[in-house]
Image (tube, rainbow, N blue to C red):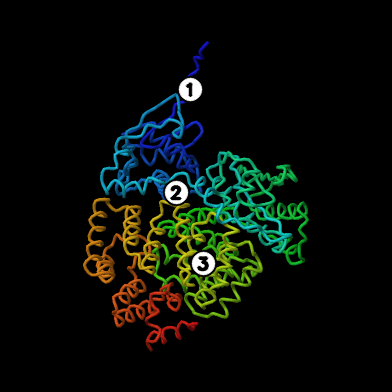
């Protein structure tokens, strides 16, 4: 007898389907990571397609009676994350239209279904997808690859696996679950995850290694069991837990799972004030050390026993800053700096907030938020304050090493700071990354730099930044075949990132494969959001220029493109990039002028000029030698 109970409504739009009951968003059958406020916003919009949903209504629904969240900034960040998941943009909306100062409207066709069929089993393919009748549609297909990030990464990870050193235990901290309804708790849980990774990473480096948050976070809301996750991350133990907040009280639960048989080794529950959250983390770390028989040094015991209270409001601001910084874009950088400053204003003794603020300043030139000449002095002063407050904080030393290398060209101090950071927390994958790319590579120590990058990858196998920087490390070492293999793997793992295709385009020019360089340039521009027809015309002009004048025609066209404002990330537009174009054109005088201007601006890439292959023809030039002397590096 058939049941009369109605099945839950689900929505289907484009190549997506969304189940509001479970919060699951899928694209072509593959699950896309989305949670928290973006899920709630998507639900509201789909309930009322083609209607205005006012910002005030979203505020009441998502942040009722909240006194901590900066509503405007938080809503903007949540909508930005939702658009990223949908491969949508505010400028050319396919799904979510912004009505200035009023709210948002869902503009795409949407259907409701009570019989949700998973896309991978039975999803209708449109005629436009099967036709592929023009080069434009072939290019446009490039951007419809994303969504199944975890599945792609795990498939590609088989080529990167490396066993941990004999006798060293490897552990992964899975994303802590949000067990409450407080709107503060999503970032409180994320903060708990990151801080536990930091705490555990410094317990006993020779005995215990900890997987970085970037890779562990991909298992948020996964259906995989502990055994599968442990195999994919190549770890012996998993720590999972949850956090619930009720006003100024929190409850933290945690359990340690042994990978070999998925047995619970230990479990604990802790109730405390929010201000004692760091003490709770220390207690969990100490309990884990006992369970996996990690002997703690006297210094580590002292650090765990003397954890300071943290102001609850300062901690909230710090966690919101971390969440904003994770966006890695201009707006996210600005928001993170604002929140870290707020945390410091509330609690001037908060060392971690100073270190995070220093990191945001130091890397703000990468996101385009600040010029290096403005950002780096702020970063230096802030990092120095973090270290003065807590000399055992590895993050403060890591960013100070970055500053000493890229801004002050003080190489002995940079090395000392990086080594201090690695001694305090050898499980910090970013410390290995910066030590490799900010110190070892610029000084020509390429074999050591490559090994550091491989160590970083073992700790954070699914990090785009680390995987991609290994390719750059190979390029600086003139190992172009290895660099190509690495970048091709990275683009398989992260297919929808323009910067990786731009880096492939650069690499192909080193290999004199200009036709392939042109193809990758086109892919980068499409993914960056340029109109496919415009890109097709550009691609044809690059081919014509190359056919008529060879490599010189290609570089002349790139020089012309460098004046545009809509170039993809890492296109040759800054002075150090223009210098590469000029030297490829044989215009050494202009190349040297551009490099001297880049030096005056303290552009971060100046530390790489001695190892940049394009500048090999400048090595005998006195002005180039003078620049190397000013930077403090010597050619090998």
Q: For residue 593, what is the image quadrant?
A: bottom left
Q: Is residue 302 left or right of residue 140?
A: right
Q: Is disc 1 in contact with disc 2, using a CB cutoff of under 8 Å?
A: no
> Which mark lies nearer to you, 1 or 2?
1
Left or right, 84 with reference to 187: left
Per the image, label 1 sits on a secondary structure element best described as loop
Above or below 631: residue 251: above
Q: Which mark is residue 358?
A: 3
Point 43% across, 39% down: residue: 27
Q: Nearer the viewer, residue 147 or 304?
A: 147
How far apart are the alpha carbons under marks 2 and 3? 22 Å
Q: Residues within 10 Å of mark 3 (few under 14, many from 20)?
A: many
49 displayed left or right of 487? left
| Tag in front: 2 or 3 | 3
Furthest residue toward top: 1
Crowd tier of the residue under label 1, counting other residues whose Cα lies within 10 Å: few below 14, some 14–19, many 20 or above: few
* Camera-side residue of 508 and 245: 508
Q: Residue at x 39, y 40 (%)?
A: 56
The residue that mark 2 highlights is 74
- Quick one: label 1 or label 2, which is nearer the N terminus? 1
Q: Is residue 276 above or below residue 373?
A: above
Mark 2 or mark 3: name the one nearer the start of the chain: 2
Separation of disc 1 and disc 2 at Cα?
Answer: 33 Å
At 44% from the left and 83% from the top, the residue drawn is 628
Using the image as rendered, state which of residue 550 and residue 413 is in the foreground: 550
Picture quarter containing residue 625?
bottom left
Q: Which mark is residue 7?
A: 1
Q: Circle 3 sits in a helix, a strand or a loop, which is it? A: helix
SS assignment at label 2? helix
């Amino acid at each position: 007898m058939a049941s009369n109970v109605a099945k839950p409504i689900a929505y289907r739009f484009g190549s997506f389907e969304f189940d509001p009951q479970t919060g699951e968003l899928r694209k072509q059958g593959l699950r896309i990571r989305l949670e928290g406020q973006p899920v709630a916003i998507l639900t509201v919009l789909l309930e009322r397609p083609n209607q205005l949903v006012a910002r005030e209504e979203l505020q009441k629904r998502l942040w009722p009676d909240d006194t901590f969240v900066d509503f405007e900034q938080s809503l903007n960040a949540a909508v930005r994350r939702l658009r990223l998941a949908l491969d949508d943009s505010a400028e050319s909306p396919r799904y979510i239209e912004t009505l200035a100062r009023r709210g948002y409207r869902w503009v795409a066709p949407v259907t409701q279904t009570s019989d949700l069929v998973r896309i991978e089993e039975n999803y209708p393919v449109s005629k436009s997808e099967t036709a592929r009748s023009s080069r434009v549609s072939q290019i446009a297909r490039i951007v419809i690859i994303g969504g199944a990030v975890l599945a792609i990464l795990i498939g590609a990870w088989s080529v990167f696996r490396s066993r941990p050193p004999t006798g060293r235990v490897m552990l992964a901290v899975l994303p802590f679950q949000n067990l409450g309804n407080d709107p503060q708790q999503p970032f409180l849980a994320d903060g708990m995850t990151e801080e536990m990774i930091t705490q555990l990473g410094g317990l006993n480096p020779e005995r215990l290694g900890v997987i970085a948050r970037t890779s562990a976070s991909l298992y948020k809301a996964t259906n995989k069991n502990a055994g599968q996750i442990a195999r994919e991350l190549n770890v012996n133990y998993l720590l999972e837990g949850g956090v619930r907040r009720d006003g100024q009280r929190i409850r933290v639960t945690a359990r340690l799972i042994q990978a070999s048989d998925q047995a619970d080794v230990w479990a604990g529950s802790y109730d405390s004030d929010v201000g004692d959250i760091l003490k709770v983390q220390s207690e969990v770390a100490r309990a884990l050390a006992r369970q996996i028989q990690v002997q703690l040094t006297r210094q580590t015991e002292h650090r765990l026993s003397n954890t300071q209270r943290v102001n609850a409001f300062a901690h909230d601001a710090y966690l919101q800053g971390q969440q904003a910084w994770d966006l890695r874009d201009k707006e996210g950088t600005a928001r993170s700096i604002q929140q870290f400053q707020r945390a410091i204003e509330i609690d001037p003794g908060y060392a971690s907030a100073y270190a995070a603020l220093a990191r945001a300043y130091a890397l703000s030139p990468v996101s385009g938020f600040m010029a290096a000449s403005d950002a780096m002095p702020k970063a230096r002063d802030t990092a120095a304050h973090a270290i003065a407050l807590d000399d055992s904080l590895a993050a403060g030393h890591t960013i100070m090493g970055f500053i000493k290398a890229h801004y002050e060209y003080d190489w002995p101090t940079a090395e000392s700071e990086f080594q201090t950071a690695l001694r305090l927390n050898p499980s910090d994958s970013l410390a290995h990354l910066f030590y490799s790319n900010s110190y070892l590579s610029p000084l020509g120590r390429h074999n050591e730099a490559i090994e550091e990058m491989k160590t970083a990858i073992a700790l954070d196998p699914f990090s785009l930044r680390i995987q991609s920087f290994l390719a750059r490390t190979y390029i600086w070492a003139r190992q172009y075949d290895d660099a190509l293999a690495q970048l091709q793997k990275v683009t398989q793992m992260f297919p929808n990132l323009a910067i990786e295709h731009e880096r492939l385009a650069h690499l192909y020019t080193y290999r004199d494969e200009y036709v392939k360089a042109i193809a990758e340039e086109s892919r980068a521009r499409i993914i960056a959001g340029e109109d496919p027809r415009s890109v097709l015309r550009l691609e044809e002009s690059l081919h014509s220029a190359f056919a008529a004048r060879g490599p010189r025609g290609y570089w002349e066209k790139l020089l012309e493109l460098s004046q545009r404002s809509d170039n993809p990330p890492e296109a040759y537009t800054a002075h150090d990039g223009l210098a590469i174009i000029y030297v490829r054109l044989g215009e050494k005088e202009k190349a040297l002028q551009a490099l001297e201007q880049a030096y005056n601006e303290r552009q971060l890439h100046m530390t790489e000029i001695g190892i940049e292959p394009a500048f090999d023809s400048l090595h005998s030039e006195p002005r180039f030698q003078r620049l190397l002397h000013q930077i403090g590096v010597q050619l090998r």
